[in-house]
Amino acid sequence: MQKKRKSYRLGRRPGEQRPRPLLGNQGRVGKLATGRDIIGGKTNQIRVLQLRKKVKIGTWNVRSMLQLGKVQLLGQELERNKVGICGLSEVRWEGQGHFITTEGHTMIYSGSDKQGMYGVAVWLHNLE
């Protein structure tokens, strides 16, 4: 009877912590994955680089944006929570399009042919 061989995640055995050797067609890159840059090919001279910027992304079922002042209220809430991109459902606007709010934020929306039904939108924070 054959003993069933246990498979390991990503082909590594438990306790094996060293990185795998590079394949023959892979070259080394100047930037490390940790956000550090190798200066002059020497690892003892390292400067830290900021490679990413954090962005909050969210969704919100607004349940209707047909009342006056709802867009401004939405903008205030999303600014207060520091949300950069927000997907909105049940917007209930007619047609498709986009516009820029008085605060400079962008709204992209798509709805049905009849106002008051369906509709989604994306709110993008002012990119200044």
Image: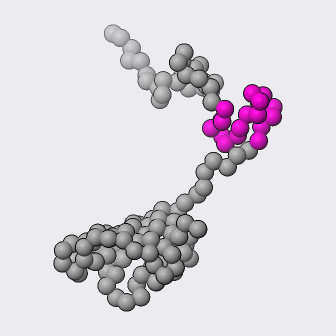
Q: Quadrant location of residue 119?
A: bottom left
For the C terminus, give its image quadrant.
bottom right
Task: Name the colouring of the figure.
Answer: one colour
Residue at far left of view: 114
Q: Is residue 20 visible?
A: no
Residue in view at x 70 percent, y 46 percent:
49
Q: Would you say residue 67 is visible in this rendering?
A: yes
State yes or no: residue 29 in magenta.
no
Quarter placement of the N terminus: top left
| Residue 90 spot, x, y in % from top left | 30, 74
The total of numbered circles placed on residues is 0
> Furthest residue to the right?
44
Residue at point 54%, 15% (across, down): 24
Residue at 70 percent across and 40 percent down: it is: 36
Verify whether residue 31 appears in magenta: yes
Q: Position of residue 96 (x, y in %)?
A: 28, 70
Q: Where residue 14 appears, x then y in whole percent? A: 56, 26
81 and 12: which is toward the camera: 81
* Residue 54 at x, y percent in the picture: 58, 57
Q: Quadrant of residue 74?
A: bottom left
- Which of the pair 64/110 is nearer the observer? 110
Q: Nearer the viewer, residue 112 or 4?
A: 112
| Residue at position x 57%, y 20% in the image | 22
* Side (left or right) of 88 relative to 22: left
> Does residue 34 lie above or below 2 as drawn?
below
Residue placed furthest toward the top: 1
| Magenta residues, start to end | 30-47
**Residue 73 position (above or below residue 112):** below
